Image (cartoon, coloured by chain):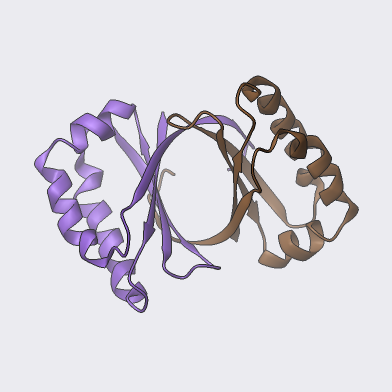
Chain colours: A purple, B brown
Amino acid sequence: MILEIADFRITPGRQDEFDAAIVHGVQTVISRAKGFRGFKVNKSLETPERYLLMIFWDALEDHMVGFRQSPAFAEWRAIVGPFFAAAPQVEHFTLLAKSENS
Amino acid sequence: MILEIADFRITPGRQDEFDAAIVHGVQTVISRAKGFRGFKVNKSLETPERYLLMIFWDALEDHMVGFRQSPAFAEWRAIVGPFFAAAPQVEHFTLLAKSENS
């Protein structure tokens, strides 16, 4: 399994709208993609315009090819893109270690 | 619950040593702190020197006061600090939403 982390900076003052949009976008668009295994949306305490979207995929290709090269990617961006104040920063991670309960 | 994310960039070529050091440091030092609830260590695919350490705390103060202002913080930094190529970037996050299985 691969963890995608998308680091978003949105326009100040639009947090409440974006809270709804990002969850709606994940639940209605991304979660239907092949290889999607789960998600978390985290909001920064220190930087109120910063969000980290974490998506678990079976494989890197499920995100970069299966999702990003499908029409669903444009659907997703139409929902969240209008809030972006900067280009999203996206990287993928493997899990080195974790505690039993997390 | 609060999620701390510490974003580390280490000296290239020392990944195997750091893999062992970061897990050792969390398991022997941080995990004994009051309010510690769990951890994950993630390694970037695109940036092999980048690690994200995720720690779940009961409250922000457990990390910023209870841990950082205790002797344990220097113990932790003695284990991982020698590998750092840049100052760590640390922020705290709240969970806005998640899927049932993640």
Counting from the top left corner in percent of width and height, residue B3 is at 58, 56
Residue at 66%, 26% (x, y): give it. B19
Residue at 30%, 60% (x, y): give it. A23
Residue B96 lies in quadrant: bottom left
Counting from the top left corner in percent of width and height, residue B17 is at 70, 22
Q: Is residue A9 left or right of residue B56?
A: left
Relative depth, front residue between A1 and B50: B50
Residue B39 lies in quadrant: top right
Toward the bottom, the furthest residue is A13
- Above or below residue B102? Residue B61 is below
Q: Is residue B54 left or right of residue B101?
A: right
- Above or below residue A68? Residue A27 is below
Residue at 36%, 79% (x, y): give it. A13
Residue B70 at least partly seen: yes
Counting from the top left corner in percent of width and height, residue A83 is at 26, 67
- Above or below residue A79? Residue A101 is above
